Image (cartoon, coloured by chain):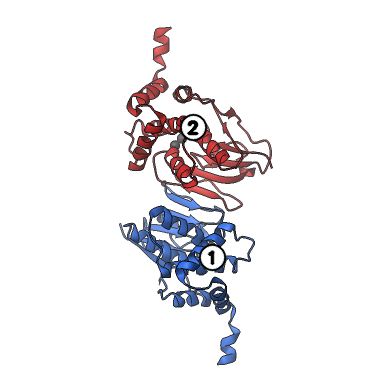
Chain colours: A red, B blue
Amino acid sequence: MSKTVVLGHKNPDTDSITSAIVYAYLKNQVGHEAEAIRLGDVTEETAFALEQFKVEAPRLVTALEQAEQPVILVDHNEFQQSIDGIEDAHILEVVDHHRIANFETADPLYYRAEPVGCTATILLKLFKEHGVEVPQNMAGLMLSAIISDSLLFKSPTCTEQDIKAAKELEAIAGVDAQEYGLNMLKAGADVSSKTIEE
Amino acid sequence: MSKTVVLGHKNPDTDSITSAIVYAYLKNQVGHEAEAIRLGDVTEETAFALEQFKVEAPRLVTALEQAEQPVILVDHNEFQQSIDGIEDAHILEVVDHHRIANFETADPLYYRAEPVGCTATILLKLFKEHGVEVPQNMAGLMLSAIISDSLLFKSPTCTEQDIKAAKELEAIAGVDAQEYGLNMLKAGADVSSKTIEE
Ligand SMILES: [Mn+2]
Ligand SMILES: [Mn+2]
Ligand SMILES: [Mn+2]
Ligand SMILES: [Mn+2]
């Protein structure tokens, strides 16, 4: 059986990229060999977060090459949002915060969904449940995901749990969430600045 | 919005009946008003467990009367195994240990599935996560479910986690799992004994 891959959805946002990285890290810490992959380009916003916390982008993989490939899905569950070939994969786990639809498995699995604003908020709970310490760079990536999905805590999907998680992560990451968050969101929105400067 | 109902599958086994009772108890303890219901007759095996731990069977309800009824599913997720009218319900949560299929929701939800042998094994974790003490009768019901689903720890679906949970529950319930379990399974299997005695 080949190594488990951890992946977010197509057209990946910051939560999909960073949750794949962070959950693969956690799985490796608990002795389950896993590699984060991504299904598409890293956005400017996500690139800003990866650079800030000095973490490499996951490897780009757009289709599963073998049946029964062990996979873990984060930040999505619907097959049409997932990697090509997902129908033939062995889905070991899902960690997500969306409705469930267009999803099924042949076997029992670990499925953890919560009605919160961001996958990272659930991942922080999983670190605690496994008794694994959150390193500074992983905290920074989780904080970035919450800021991105919640538009700096302003989205109606943002819950008290997301805000509480972000406060904890802010302290570990060693950044000011408001200042860092504005710069990160600006990096994503700011296509014009380059044109003006250049 | 009417009170949340907690329900197991059609043709309920011991796990479906007791997990509905136990999870409704836990929800009420954390301030979410909930009532266990059942979709069918209580088996002899389940009746033995309920009598042993002095707990009433849930109310029989076979169809949801109103759309958007808030429901929590335990021990199943597939709609064809669930209550009539489930397609129009508001599914708040699922706690289960089966594959996922023929299931979808309109909204984000709390979904907790783990690849273990019994729903009760997951429920014991939820008591701990919520910091709620397990009373003697609820421990007895959860132990009964694990014994039933695992055929007294002999089924290939029984995991180390189920055995560990059963040991903990045995101590709280104040029964010997082997002795009590054999009697419970016998009560379920033993249709002949009555005919002989009567
Ligand atoms: Mn996303
Ligand atoms: Mn997300
Ligand atoms: Mn069952
Ligand atoms: Mn069961």
Q: CA distance from mark 2 to mark 1?
A: 37 Å
Which residue is painted at 33% across and 57% down in the image?
B32
Q: Quadrant of residue B33?
A: bottom left
Residue B21 horizontal/vertical position (percent): 42, 66
Which residue is painted at 43% across and 67% down in the image?
B138
| Residue A96 as seen in the image, left or right of residue B133 | right
Q: Is mark 2 within 8 Å of ligand 2?
A: no
Q: Quadrant of the N terminus of chain B?
A: bottom left
Amino acid marked by disc 1: Ile
Residue A96 horizontal/vertical position (percent): 47, 42
Residue A119 horizontal/vertical position (percent): 45, 39
Q: Which residue is label 1 attached to? A: B146
Whether residue B15 is situated above or below residue B77 in the rendered picture:
below
Whether residue B140 is situated above or below residue A47 in the rendered picture:
below
Secondary structure type for disc 1: helix
Q: Quadrant of residue A167?
A: top left
Amino acid marked by disc 2: Thr
Asked if the residue at tag 1 contacts the one at tag 2, i.e. Cβ–Cβ closer than 8 Å, the answer is no
Numbered disc total: 2
Q: Chain of mark 1?
A: B
Residue B11 horizontal/vertical position (percent): 52, 69
Camera-side residue: B15 or B165? B165
Q: Which residue is label 2 attached to? A: A18
Q: Chain of mark 2?
A: A
